[in-house]
Image: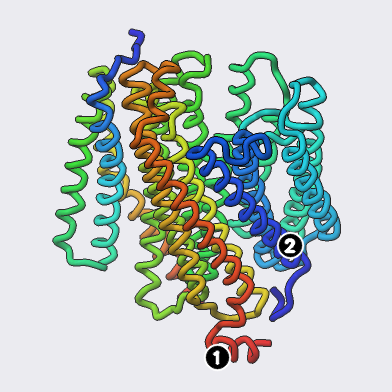
Amino acid sequence: MEYYIQDIPSSHFLPIFVVSALVILFGMAYAGFFTVVKLKLVKRYFMVFAYLSWLILVGCIYYLGELLKVEPYTQKVLIGAMFGYLVFPHVVYFLLEKVHNRFESESNQI
Amino acid sequence: MQGNRLYEGQKLALKYFMVAIVLFGAQLLFGLVAAIQFLYPNFLFNILDFSIARILHINALVVWLLYAMIGAVYWLLPDEAGIEVVGVKLGNLAFYILTAAVAVVVLVYLFIQIGPGKESTIWFITEGREYIEAPRWADIGIVAVVLVFLYNVYATVMKGKHTGILVVLMADLIALAGLYLAGMFYTDNIAVDQYWWWWVVHLWVEATWEVYVAAVGGYILIKTLNANRKVVEMWLWIEVAMMFGSGILGLGHHYFWIGTPEYWWEIGALFSALEPVPLVGLFVHVLYDWGKERGKGNNIKNTPAFAWLTVETFGNFLGAGVWGFMHTLPQINLYTHGTQWPAAHGHLAFFGAYVAILIGAIYLAIQGKAGLKEMRMTKASWWAITLITVGVLIMSVSLTISAYVQTMVERGQYGGTWEGYFIAQANQWFVQGMGWRLFSGLAVVVGYGFLVYDLLTIDKKQPAEVREGAVAAA
């Protein structure tokens, strides 16, 4: 089915700009809190803020989809992508940790 | 560097940096003129028209960033490869030819501001393509100079050490240079012309330049934080994959309204949404390295360079990520395209992603030139980074306010008509936004003054213990 962009009422412009900014900011907040907790730079309970940020991010993405009048299928893809993003910092951190351990133990042996 | 002695390639880098800083000043000067003309349209009318001030503002930016990029490569190339740059004499010759060509192009822009658009105009005056307006003779000259540069890089790496940073740069520079060719041929059809033109602009700024920054950023992390080279290089490959993965098809967000098929809406939307992901990865990486190195008692070896690298990380995220995503998706871009939104995004993104890191690279070269083991911030460094960063931030916010007025009034209320355009331009909120943009532009110019002063004097203003370290090393 071909998708045509729907008209958006001008009263939705401001919420769209704000929610779009929040998507990126809460996306970063999730990754940031996750990393600093894992690095033990702050106490472990700060991890709650990481997952809270992710939940707000999911809410923002859903609301953004509504404001932009995306198709139901795209809305589902967006929410699916959020689960992908839930895993993303874990993968990045896992890779960094493995790389550090591998190369630092090698340099210690030298 | 060999002890306190510089490689010839590094001396060439300093020349590139010097011209880059002069062109940075020209960019700010013409930007200031254009900002005044937004508020007082008669200012310098028929002497330096807005169209020319804008061309010079934007082209000076692109050219000074390229100068600084070439300079940074010539700086790190012998250091990484462990040998002198191969073909450095040719490199010097290319530098003087390029600089003379840039001077001639600028003079032509200034002396021939209006006239008929003929075949000869494309060859000798301007090609008329935004950001890359250089006439064709200069285009061909640029290609020749870049070929010399590529030869020098490839020949040096082949002969010397093949570090990960250099290998990434080799692959990236060939793409960066090759893409320039897509902006050189002329077609009668504006949609086809724009289609190829975006290959240069987008695939430079959102793909090859991003990868370049990741490589140079890795080098700065090693030099300033003593970060583990293998970790930096390993991570560099992951970032390269992510940046090319999202950046190449992110091209789609420029194809929404130029006559290309509608499937670009979906492609552009999907890959634009993915483009901030590598920035998050980069952020986690820098945070991780800083957190790991923090406990080891390593002093930061060059605090001004590291401070600018930090500005780069956040500026890139805010400018490219937040400001980009706010107006990029096709549903909303229908209303924001052609307003001040891209200007707000462009100012913060270019500053955050490229200006900041290249200033950091220049500070690294100043440290190397003076032979200092460590370099600390001075008051002038502090004023420069504060005024420039805060100035650009206020500028972006001001432009956003003006852009919002345009979106609401010109597009929402009046449906993108000429009437709506002029009503929005006269709206008091739009005008006030432009006023604040001018004010913040002045702050950036003052910051630039501090920056130039600092770059010229910082090595002499280092504390005694740092200077004594340098003497002992020599």
Residue B399 picture location, percent across and down:
41, 41
Q: Quadrant of the C terminus of chain B?
A: bottom right
Task: Residue under label 1, please give it.
Answer: B464
| Residue occupying image coordinates x 36% and y 9% | A2
Say which residue appears at 38% left-offset and 27% top-offset. B424
Q: Amino acid at mark 2?
A: Lys
Q: Is residue B383 above or below residue B467?
A: above
Q: Quadrant of residue B179?
A: top right
Element type where label 2 sits in the image: helix
Tell me which corner region of the image, top left, top right, bottom left or bottom right, holds residue B136. Answer: top right
In the rendered image, residue B415, in percent from the top left (x then y), is placed at 36, 16
Q: In the displayed image of the protein, which residue is found farthest to the front?
A: B42
How crowded pointer 1 is (Cα within 10 Å; few <14, some 14-19, many 20+) is rated as few
Q: CA distance from mark 2 to mark 1?
A: 28 Å
Give the vertical position of A43 relative to A15 (above or below).
below
The residue depicted at 17 percent of the width and 54 percent of the height is A49
| Comes first in the chain, label 2 or label 1 | 2
Front residue of A73 and B52:
B52
The number of numbered badges drawn on the structure is 2
Q: Chain of mark 2?
A: B
The residue under label 2 is B15
The spot of residue B207 in percent (x, y) is 54, 40
B175 above or below B160?
A: above
Q: Is residue B182 visible?
A: no
Q: Quadrant of the N terminus of chain B?
A: bottom right
Nearest the eye: B25 or A104: B25
Identify residue type, mark 1: Ala
Residue B114 in sight from this viewpoint? yes
